[in-house]
Amino acid sequence: MTVINRESGTSIDEVADGLYRITTPIPPSVFLGGFSFNQYLVLDDEPLLFHAGPRRTFDLVRQAIAAVVPVERLHWIGFSHVESDECGALNQLPAAAPHALPVCGRVAAMVSMEDLADRTPRALGNGEILVMGRRTYAWLDAPHLPHGWECGFLMERTSGTFLCHAPFTQPGDRTPALTEADILSPSEAMRHQMDYFAHGRDYAALFDHLIAERPTTLACMHGSAWRGDGAALLAALRDSLAGN
Ligand SMILES: [Fe+2]
Ligand SMILES: [Fe+2]
């Protein structure tokens, strides 16, 4: 682990080959039980940051990127849906990265980003491929999972790396960078407390598609990244949602 800022507790860790979790903890005094906001940096010819983070943590995220790769090399800033923790700093990062472009689903581009983003986003359709160099990521539309019509994820099929955002939202401000432990129970406990999932009609078909991707590393936005049988984990979440 590389500590970026002692006051905020921001740190960066490599959790898979060329995949880095940047995390900033929120202490229990601010959020009951503690919480965390993560961004993921993917190295390649065209490095990607998945989630820009809130505007207030822009400088911390910038410093964390710089610990691994010169910030000006950042090429893509991806996000799953339009909220401040996903894309608040979207217009601040390009000041440090002159070639950086937002990348998101077509719905996010149409509804929000063609107006909100200072640079025209690369808008990906469902299944469309983003080539970053030796890595390719597929955009997967995931409307309303957990919320937002525009929601979607990025999946690297060769490595099984799933930039999956928030379906597995774990509490705690000191979570390990990577875990193989149960993350479904704590994330389901949070969902039952806070009810932040939309009540989507097409979850069954959507889960079928995601399970068929058979991810092995999940880049979760809150808490630890996770390694294991992602198809089984997604099926367990699907079944839990069906039972409410
Ligand atoms: Fe969200
Ligand atoms: Fe969010």
Image (cartoon, rainbow, N blue to C red):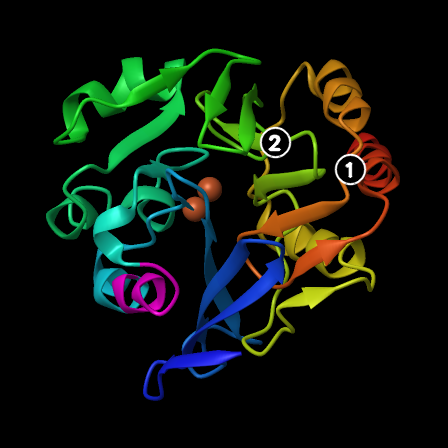
**Label for residue 61?**
none
Whether the residue carrying mark 2 lies under 8 Å from ligand 1 is answered with no
Q: Is residue 184 magenta?
A: no
Q: Residue at x 86, y 40 (%)?
A: 236
Q: Is residue 65 magenta?
A: yes
Residue carrying label 2: 155
Residue carrying label 1: 244
Picture quadrant of residue 212: top right
| Disc 1: CA contacts within 10 A as few (<14), some (14-19) or many (>=20) | few
User: As rendered, which of 63 and 198 lies closer to the eye?
Assistant: 63
Instruction: Name the quadrant of the C terminus.
Output: top right
Picture quadrant of residue 68: bottom left
Whether the residue carrying mark 1 lies under 8 Å from ligand 1 is answered with no
User: As rendered, which of 151 and 124 lies closer to the eye?
Assistant: 124
Upstream in the sequence, badge 2 or badge 1?
Answer: 2
Left or right: where 68 falls relative to 72: right
Q: Residue at x 63, y 21 (%)?
A: 200
Whether 125 is drawn above or below 148: the answer is: above
For the residues labelled 2 and 1, say whether their Cβ atoms are less than 8 Å apart: no
Which amino acid lies under the numbered mark 1 shown in the image of this protein?
A: Asn
Q: Main secondary structure of the magenta part?
A: helix
Where residue 98 sits in the image (x, y, percent)? Answer: 14, 42
User: As rendered, which of 25 and 78 lies closer to the eye?
Assistant: 78
Left or right: where 20 falls relative to 74: right
Picture quadrant of residue 65: bottom left
Whether 115 is drawn above or below 77: the answer is: above
Which amino acid lies under the numbered mark 2 shown in the image of this protein?
A: Met
Q: CA distance from mark 2 to mark 1?
A: 27 Å
Q: Which residues are magenta?
A: 62-69
Q: What kind of element bears circle 1?
A: loop
Where residue 42 sits in the image (x, y, percent)? Answer: 48, 47
